[in-house]
Image (cartoon, rainbow, N blue to C red):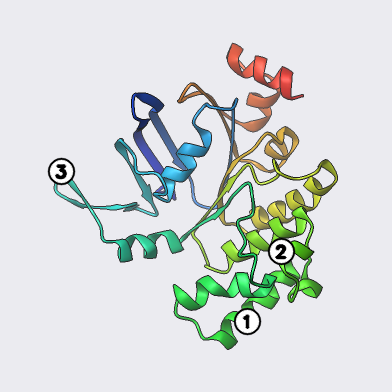
Amino acid sequence: MRPMVEITDLHKSFGRVEVLRGINIAVPPGSVTSILGPSGSGKSTMLRCINHLEKPTAGAIQVDGEYVGYTRNGDTLSEISGRALARQRAGIGMVFQRFDLYAHMTAIENIIEGPIRVLGKSRTSAMEEARELLDRVGLGDRARAYPAQLSGGQQQRVAIARALAMKPKVMLFDEPTSALDPELVGEVLSVMKEVANSGITMLVVTHEVAFAREVSNEAIFMADGVVVERGDPDEVLRKPNHPRTRDFLSRVL
């Protein structure tokens, strides 16, 4: 079976600082992959490379068999146009740490913006689907609320609904609970579990070890820009082999 996401020898440098040093990952369709590791290990940078928010220094990324940001002619990769990249990104949903909702738009307006502008849907159709998504994330009664009127957990659930509105092949979550108060984390993780159960391919950068163990098909531990350990979540997170993984988990837990 062709991987939904395939990362090959990915390198990323910022000036002289090499953040990613040769990442190789294949993610099967419909699976959930949790990515853990200390701050500065390159987790978020790798996620941002997948949808080309960060341009790789070297290596390649394919989503559903298509190179992200490039087209291949023989052995040569050529950059694609901005419009073509926007089309690719439409199929790669991303949920950030800080919600990034438009403050001047209501919850439902935030959700319909992409489907109308990028996918060309009618406002009526986009509104109908947005209401269904708000119901799905437990916010059907908050459609007309502005972000400032929502809790952090509610804003993050709107952000998840907004990403799902684009009908993505892949969902990327970049530490989606790290900016939330502890009592709000559970409501976001509950929605993420529902998304995982729907069969969409997910890559999740997280420190939520219990979530990673319960929901993931694979757990990956990164440190210093490389994959240190990966495998069955129960094995990696309960009985890690690498000392870096053991040290990290002892601190987190």
Q: Earlier in the sequence, mark 3 or mark 1?
A: 3
Amino acid type at image mark 1: Met
What label sits on residue 127 in the rendered view?
1
Observer-nearest residue: 31 or 123? 123
- In the rendered structure, the answer to whether residue 110 lies left or right of residue 145 reads left
Whole-number angstrom distance, CA of label 3 to CA of label 1? 44 Å
Q: Earlier in the sequence, mark 2 or mark 1?
A: 1
Check disc 3: other Cα within 10 Å, few if <14, some if 14-19, many if 20+.
few
Observer-nearest residue: 132 or 149? 149
Picture coordinates of residue 15, whole percent (x, y): 34, 29
Instruction: Check whether the beta carbons of the residues at disc 2 and disc 1 lie within 8 A of each other.
Output: no
Observer-nearest residue: 112 or 228? 112
Q: Quadrant of residue 21?
A: top left
Residue name at image x 72 percent, y 40 percent: 211
SS state under label 2: helix
SS state under label 1: helix
Whole-number angstrom distance, CA of label 2 to CA of label 1? 18 Å
- 79 lies above or below 148: above
Q: Which image quarter is the C terminus in?
A: top right
